[in-house]
Image (cartoon, rainbow, N blue to C red):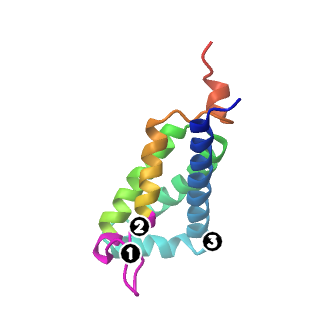
Amino acid sequence: MFNKYEVGALILRIFLGLTFFIHGLVKFQGGIGNTAGFFENIGLPGFSAYVVAIIELVGGLALIVGLGTRVVSILFAIIMVVAIFTVKLPAGFLGTPEMAGYELDLALLVISIYLAIAKSSLFSVDNVLYRSK
């Protein structure tokens, strides 16, 4: 029988992984050069767009299968903190007609932190690789 907390963590892990995977994919499909230009406009180095997009894409897939959940979740949390403080904070929690607020970013940050500190091994590759004897 499955522990209800593990099932909850599984749902959050898959949701977070899928969300970041899609965001990473869109960065490449929309032209990663455009994303790099946006990063430069907000004061971040352009190459960081490539780093973020790769973390989102590969990390999203890793979370979906449950590989490196804690490390990937910490990386996602860092990305969300930077996104909130460099782009979204001026728009407020709910945003403005011109810009989305940081409510979704904050929710993704909280899920990332939860997965970084909680045991999330149900149906995960980590559970198979690092199973206690």
Residue occupying image coordinates x 49% and y 76%: 34
Give the amino acid at mark 2.
Glu
Q: Which residue corresponds to mark 2?
A: 103
Q: Are marks 1 and 2 in contact (CB under 8 Å)?
A: yes
Residue 55 at x, y percent in the picture: 52, 52
Taking the image as drawn, is residue 67 in sight? no
Residue 114 at x, y percent in the picture: 45, 43
Instruction: Say whether residue 90 is magenta.
Output: yes
**Tag 1, which secondary structure?**
loop
Residue occupying image coordinates x 48% and y 45%: 73
Quick one: quadrant of the C terminus? top right
Residue nearer the viewer, 22 or 47 = 22
Give the amino acid at mark 1.
Leu
Q: Is residue 95 above or below residue 49?
A: below
Q: Which residue corresponds to mark 1?
A: 94
For residue 10, which quarter of the picture? top right
**Tag 2, which secondary structure?**
helix
Q: Nearer the viewer, mark 3 or mark 2?
A: 2
Report crowding for label 3: few under 14, some 14 to 19, many 20 or more residues within 10 A (C-alpha).
Answer: few
Distance from disc 3 to disc 2, alpha carbons, whole Å, reads 25 Å
Residue nearer the viewer, 1 or 125 = 1
Residue nearer the viewer, 116 or 12 = 12
Q: Which residue corresponds to mark 3?
A: 29
Residue occupying image coordinates x 45% and y 65%: 104
Give the amino acid at mark 3.
Gln
Q: Is residue 7 above or below residue 84?
A: above
Report crowding for label 2: few under 14, some 14 to 19, many 20 or more residues within 10 A (C-alpha).
Answer: some
Residue 88 at x, y percent in the picture: 35, 71
Answer with left or right where residue 81 lies relative to residue 108.
left
Q: Which residues are magenta?
A: 87-104
Distance from disc 3 to disc 1, alpha carbons, whole Å, reads 27 Å
